[in-house]
Amino acid sequence: MSRYLKVLVPLFLVSVALLLIFKWTAVKNFVIRWRGGPRKSPSLIRALPFDVLREGERKRIRDYLYNLQKKLTPTQILIPEIAGRPRGAPLGKYVRVSVVVEARDRKAAAYLRANQGRLATLILDSIENFSYEQLRSRQAVWKFKEELARRIFFYYGDKIRDISIVQFEIHQTKG
């Protein structure tokens, strides 16, 4: 019996260590749920995966994005206010999105800042590929984020750590 324990105990410990290394996010989420809910995160980006803001608050939105820009770490890049018309949208309707892309390190952040225009084009293309009806529900924002993350990771996967949507609005042009 002790022979089996000598083998099983180290094997169990190695398995737990591998689980903690490779599945840290899953373990962290389990512990958070077990303790009774998420705690407040010190980072604005982590606390708000996206923020739906009401129309008519342009000054508030600009202040929000300006303050957010000041709070970003050197590896986070804000791509502000990309506006596009979703497929099948009624005339005058458009979507405005702001995204924060978090790079793996400072070198990758410098590369992404140099290619910020290409990232903005990917975001615009993602908006235009979604149908207007898909973007009207709250669940669609998560689907949009997943699709956007998939596209950005396809092109810049080795340089990206995380993507957060910090502004998502559906607007009607005035006229």
Image: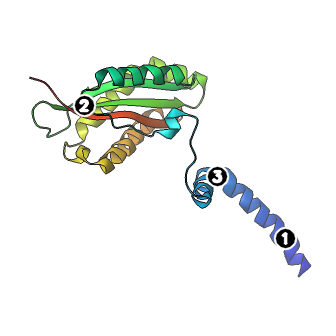
Q: Which mark is on residue 7? A: 1
Q: Residue at x 38, y 37 (%)?
A: 51
Across and down, in percent, residue 14 comes to 77, 60
Q: Which secondary structure, mark 3?
A: helix
Locate the C terminus by quadrant.
top left
Disc 2 from disc 1: Cα separation: 63 Å
Q: Which residue is drawn at the image coordinates 82% and 68% (left, top)?
A: 9
Q: Residues within 10 Å of mark 3 (few under 14, many from 20)?
A: few
Tell me whether circle 1 and circle 3 mark residues in contact (CB < 8 Å): no
Closer to the observer: label 2 or label 1?
2
At label 2, counting other C-alpha atoms closer than 10 Å, the crowd grade (few under 14, some 14-19, many 20 or more) is: few
Residue type at mark 2: give it: Glu
Q: Residues within 10 Å of mark 1 (few under 14, many from 20)?
A: few
For residue 47, the mark is none
Tag 3: amino acid: Phe
Distance Cα–Cα, label 2 vs label 3: 42 Å
At 50% from the left and 34% from the top, the residue drawn is 45
Which mark sits nearer the N-terminus, 2 or 1? 1
Q: Residue furthest top?
A: 114
Secondary structure at badge 2 equals: loop
Disc 3: which residue = 22
Which of the two discs, 2 and 3, sits closer to the camera? 2
* In-image side of 132 versus 167 (left or right): left
* Figure quadrant of residue 116: top left
